[in-house]
Amino acid sequence: MKHEAVLTEEQIAEIKKLANNTRKEFGVFGDVPIAKDIFMLLEKKGIVLCQYPFQTEEKSHMDANITWFETEYGSLTFIGLNTSLYYDEQIFALAHELYHFITKTGKAYEADEENEDRTTEKMADRFAAELLLPDEVLRLRVISQFKTSDLSGVTELPLLRFIARLHEEWWLPYRSIVFRIWEEGYIGRAMVDYLFHIDARDPDSIYSKIFSSMAQDCYRILNEKTECIEISSHILEIFIQNYEDGYITDDDFVKLLGLFGKSPENFGFELCVNEEDVEELRELFEDGDANED
């Protein structure tokens, strides 16, 4: 946690309020997890979601990227999601990008910004955490489980079981949950350091053993790299309508659908597919700008 940007109390209060209002706008009230519904909720916001497994080097990691621009028909927002991430990381990445969408911050909205602003990114991370696991819910869970909000005397195993239950219900990544418990003041830095040294993705780690024993199906889902290739259904419909109206040629229609692992035949059209053209476009897509917000 070195070199982390530090948020002020005022900034944290603003983020909590924004996250709470966003949940209300989504119709997600009280003790209700958002979890995988974040995909559907982004659609309700009019955001086009493009899912693709960007294979990046370890030192060049891309979670998600928001792109916004104006057209003659109004503004359009895309979020490109890297589906080579673990599934719980995908959920957190989308919640992070939602902050940029709501606040109009980040590279997509500030064309002259060459480097990411650490404070803005920290605020986006805090928003994602607050949206996916509200502070009041966490407080009630802590007190219900341990009968106190002071967890300084709690040993590692009970705390790991508690984290596993939160992981199962709220679908945040392990490290995000640990950080969440710390940033709300329930555990100290020494315990955070111990918990961060556990490789929660290693099936032989103590945490993985606990989580998989408590919720095997959920453990499998959240630790999956989906490698999904998808785009919002209404965008696919636009592609199809434009083709039917003669605005897209046969070749371009084939290429567009092929980019997302689909073909004209999937929608009842009989066209000749040039696999070389499709592969060329796919390679171009994969080699595109992979900067993260």
Image (cartoon, helix red, strand yellow):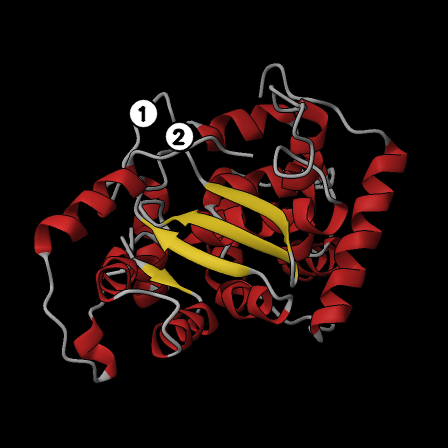
Whether residue 270 is visible: yes
Task: State yes or no: discs 1 and 2 in contact (Cβ < 8 Å).
Answer: yes
Nearer to us in this view, 57 or 1:
57
Nearer to us in this view, 18 or 277:
277
Q: How crowded is mark 2: few (under 14 residues within 10 Å), some or many (20 or more)?
A: some
Q: Residues within 10 Å of mark 1 (few under 14, many from 20)?
A: few
Q: Where in the figure is residue 264, as x and y percent of width and height?
A: 21, 73
Horizontal side of residue 147 vs 208, given as left or right: right
CA distance for labels 1 and 2: 6 Å
Horizontal side of residue 262 vs 207, given as left or right: left
**Residue found farthest to the bottom:** 268
Whether residue 151 is visible: no
Q: Where in the figure is residue 62, as x and y percent of width and height?
A: 42, 35
Q: Where in the figure is residue 64, as x and y percent of width and height?
A: 48, 43
**Residue found farthest to the right:** 10
**Residue found farthest to the front:** 246
Total numbered labels: 2
Establish if 261 lies above or below 110. below
Tell me which amino acid carries mark 2.
Answer: His
Tell me which amino acid carries mark 1.
Answer: Glu
Q: Where in the figure is residue 129, as x and y percent of width and height?
A: 63, 48
Q: Name the residue under label 1.
A: 58
The residue under the point 53% across, 53% down is: 78
Q: Is mark 2 on a helix, strand or loop?
A: loop
Q: Name the residue under label 2.
A: 61
Q: In which quadrant will I find the C terminus? A: top right
- The numbered dot on residue 145 is none
The residue under the point 74% across, 24% down is: 6
The residue under the point 21% across, 78% down is: 266
Q: What element carries label 1?
A: loop
Within the image, what quadrant is residue 4 found in?
top right
